[in-house]
Image (cartoon, helix red, strand yellow):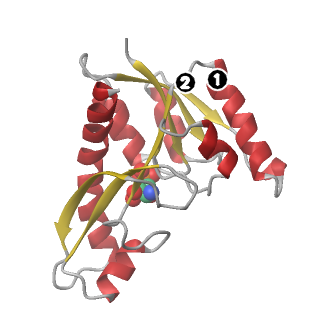
């Protein structure tokens, strides 16, 4: 039986696309049942629909400052669809402890740095400014602290002379698209 996963996005969703493409393999242990976005304009939603996957926008704005109420609304939708596992893929909302607790051990994230370095935003710029020789991406379990859960997998790339945050981001992104499906395959095969 394939694990029923939800992928959370807020924007273009290229990591979501990599996961959906990987899940087309008959032996992939997961099936993507819904792509969720807090932003109804997220470009990835249309792509998901084009793949025959349900694209669900749960706009955070009507909930104002009540982040937990927004998450409760999402959680209700996930449970209605029998979702068993969540992959955050460029989901730009900080989660409340409530959602994290609901999905503890069943929610992972991809972050574009070699954690524990550079939690949060502007990771590539910070790595270049620090004079680092390498950068990369990390897959980790989601825990209460932002980008702080236990590491699952990492991929490294060199930082090259003349790199800008954009050129480095592109090099890291290529690795993200390889690493995320590989990590999901690994975790769910063992679960
Ligand atoms: C990726 O770099 C991911 O690691 C980070 O946000 C970016 C999202 O890109 N969390 P995409 O929406 O998957 O293309």
Q: Give 55 or 101, whichever is nearer the viewer.
A: 101
Q: Does the residue labelled 2 lie within 8 Å of ligand 1?
A: no
Q: x, y (%) of residue 35? A: 53, 34
Q: Give 145 or 53, whichever is nearer the viewer.
A: 145
Q: Pointer 1: residues within 10 angstroms few (<14), some, or many (20+)?
A: few
- Would you name the residue on which mark 2 appears? 83
Distance from the alpha carbon under mark 2 to that under mark 1: 6 Å
Q: Pointer 2: residues within 10 angstroms few (<14), some, or many (20+)?
A: some
Above or below: residue 156 compared with residue 31: below
Above or below: residue 123 compared with residue 84: below
Q: Is residue 163 left or right of residue 89?
A: left
Pointers 2 and 1 in contact (CB under 8 A)?
yes
Placement of the N terminus among the 4 image quadrants: top left
Q: In this view, does 183 lie to the left or right of 93?
A: left
Q: x, y (%) of residue 84? A: 51, 25
Residue in view at x 66 percent, y 19 percent:
80
Q: Quadrant of residue 134?
A: bottom left
Q: x, y (%) of residue 10? A: 56, 50
Q: Does the residue labelled 1 lie within 8 Å of ligand 1?
A: no
Placement of the C terminus among the 4 image quadrants: top left
Q: In which quarter of the image is ligand 1?
A: bottom left
Above or below: residue 187 compared with residue 68: above
Q: For the residue labelled by badge 1, is the local secondary structure a helix, a strand or a loop?
A: helix
Q: Is residue 46 left or right of residue 170?
A: right
Q: For the residue labelled by badge 2, is the local secondary structure a helix, a strand or a loop?
A: loop
Q: Is residue 75 left or right of residue 152?
A: right
Q: x, y (%) of residue 39? A: 64, 48
Q: Give 14 or 184, whichever is nearer the viewer.
A: 184
Residue 79: image tag: 1
Q: In which quarter of the image is residue 115?
A: bottom left
Q: Quadrant of residue 65?
A: bottom right
Residue in view at x 26 percent, y 56 percent:
154
């Amino acid at each position: 039986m394939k694990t029923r996963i939800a992928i959370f996005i807020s924007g273009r969703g290229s990591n979501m696309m990599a996961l959906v493409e990987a899940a087309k393999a008959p032996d992939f242990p997961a099936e993507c049942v819904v792509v969720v976005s807090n932003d109804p304009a997220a470009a990835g939603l249309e792509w998901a629909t084009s793949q025959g996957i349900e694209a669900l926008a749960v706009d955070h704005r009507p909930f104002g400052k009540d982040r937990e109420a927004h998450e409760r609304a999402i959680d209700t939708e996930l449970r209605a669809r029998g979702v068993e596992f969540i992959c955050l893929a460029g989901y730009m909302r900080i989660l409340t402890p409530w959602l994290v607790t609901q999905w503890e051990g069943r929610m992972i994230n991809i972050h574009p740095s070699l954690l524990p370095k550079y939690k949060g935003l502007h990771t590539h710029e910070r790595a270049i400014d620090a004079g680092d020789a390498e950068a990369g991406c990390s897959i980790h379990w989601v825990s209460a602290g932002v980008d702080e859960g236990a590491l699952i997998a990492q991929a490294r790339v060199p930082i090259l002379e003349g790199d800008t945050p954009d050129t480095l981001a592109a090099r890291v992104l290529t690795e993200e698209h390889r690493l995320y499906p590989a990590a999901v395959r690994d975790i769910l095969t063992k679960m």
